[in-house]
Amino acid sequence: MSTTEIDRQWTTRLRKRVAGKLPPEKLLPDTQPTYVASWIYVFGVTTMAALGVVIVSGCLLAVRGPQWWHTSSVGHFVNSLHLWSVEIFFFAMVVHLWGKFFMAAWRGGRALTWMTGVVTFLTSVATAFTGYVSQTNFDSQWISTQAKDGINATGAGAFWNVLNTGQMLMWHIVLLPIAAVVLTALHVLLVRVKGVVPPFEKTTEVAQ
Amino acid sequence: MTSKAFRPDVDAPEWKGGHSPYDIIKEGVIAVVVVSILTILLAVAFGSPDDPQITVKSWSSNDPMDFAATALSELNNTSGSAQYGAPYNKASTGQQLGPLTLAKWVGARIPINTVNDFVVDPLKALPEQPVLSADLKQWSNASSSTRTGWVNNYTHAANKMKIVSGQLVVTATDAGPVPVMMADLLQMARTGALDQALVTQNGFYTMDYTLPLLFLADGTYLANIAQKQHLTGDQWGMMNETGNYPGQAWLWLYTFWYQVSPMNSSGNGDILVWGIMMVLSAGLLLIPFIPGLRSIPRKTRVYRLIWREHYRNTP
């Protein structure tokens, strides 16, 4: 096989493209610009860490099935871990989002990074909602019967039935988590490719 | 050739300053450890709520009058479900966003007939009972207008509905089989058989609770419990959960719109709120491209706080 032929392979092209966009020193950096020095930067990695704890505690809940936690003290504790990791996840994510807003973090060709972050947030809201209606207790009965009116009013309720516990549970443990994890991975890769947005220049304030 | 003008809310200056050491793996590990410890502490300290589910059995036992009134509203087609419209039936247009009747356009894709699904079919599932079987046969063989006449006569007499020794008593004349059907439905509910009948209409295995949840929601028993648990719409509704737990606090903006006019009183409140949230979500997503909105960070100067060390060290 000639070198030209190898260079034209899809695999070769993809490898070169990935290596060009995201060399190892960008993917796993050992330095960062000096302006990355604020408590606000902690909330991005905190969000990801909480997502990890959410997934692990959710997997533990899945081992014994959706109703285990009602009858077992261990199961109830695992449910508590799941609940509080979700609360930490959203707290960190919202602070991260507002921090990035006030940094105008979309500047310098980072609009897609911002947009993947927003879509991840919205996907996470849907994921949490499906969890709340899958609890198989009074909360899930009340929340689902209340939420149905809003979703039905959009027409989506005909396909996405919040009163169908099986459908909601599958969305909660399979489809939406996959979407959230893929979106998070894409978001982080974009951050690594584009880098952390630099501060506004001092002259910008005067010029504008 | 002229260079493109620098737009401060779109473009970012190239960083020509220094770099400092950064151990991304160490940072990630520390974050996981700290979040794990915090999660465990919160779980140990506060636990999580788990108020038991409401069943049709507990509803009909604790509040038989509400159950009977709700069952009658299913039979005479006046319940919330009977009058809902899409996706359950065609009884009403449903909510509208201006000229848009989105739910109606999609249609009744989860068809529910409250008379059959909540009353007649569950009764048919009961083991052979001579009186009830004869009454159900009479119901099946009657014309639509005859059935309507029976139900109307019963509904008229139901103003004096009462429970005597656990039995539903309504003194109705010319109500055909309706008194027996209603009385037996209450008894069926109180044994727990109605809970099963409502979820097994599609077969042995089921995870679809649409029917029992709609039935429960048509009554006032569920809502009264929710009211005590600060969960109703005017109490910021479903963003809360039972007990003193934070619930879905991130839904505050969605729930907020239900507290203000006209959404808090309009028959189209839900679709109005969804319309607002769709526009706001699209705005959040597209901020980088919206002049004015994307300038807010630069003009509010909050970034001076975030990068205060950088600005302090930059001449």
Image: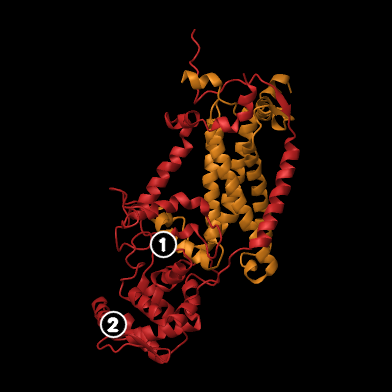
Disc marking residue B20: none
Left or right, residue A54 beside residue B151: right
Residues A5 and B35: in front is B35
**Which is more N-terminal, label 1 or label 2?**
1
Q: Amino acid at mark 1?
A: Ile
Same chain check for tags 2 and 1: yes
Residues A178 and A150: in front is A150
Left or right, residue B252 beside residue B85: right
Residues B247 and A71: in front is B247
As drawn, the chain in red is B
- Spatial CA span between label 2 and label 1: 32 Å
Relative height, residue A27 to residue B95 (above, below): above
Q: Are marks 2 and 1 in contact (CB under 8 Å)?
A: no
Q: Secondary structure at mark 2?
A: helix
Where residue A92 sits: x, y (%)?
60, 45
Residues A201 and A57: in front is A201
Relative height, residue A78 to residue A28 (above, below): below
Mark 2 nearby-residue class (10 Å; few <14, some 14–19, many ≥20): few
Chain A palette colour = orange
Q: Amino acid at mark 2?
A: Asn
Disc marking residue B110: 1
Q: Chain of mark 1?
A: B
Query: Residue B50's quadrant in the figure?
Result: bottom right
Where residue B5 sits: x, y (%)?
48, 16
Residue that mark 2 sits on: B159
Q: Secondary structure at mark 1?
A: loop
Q: Chain of mark 2?
A: B
Identified at 55% across, 66% down, the residue is A136
Relative height, residue A15 to residue A50 (above, below): above
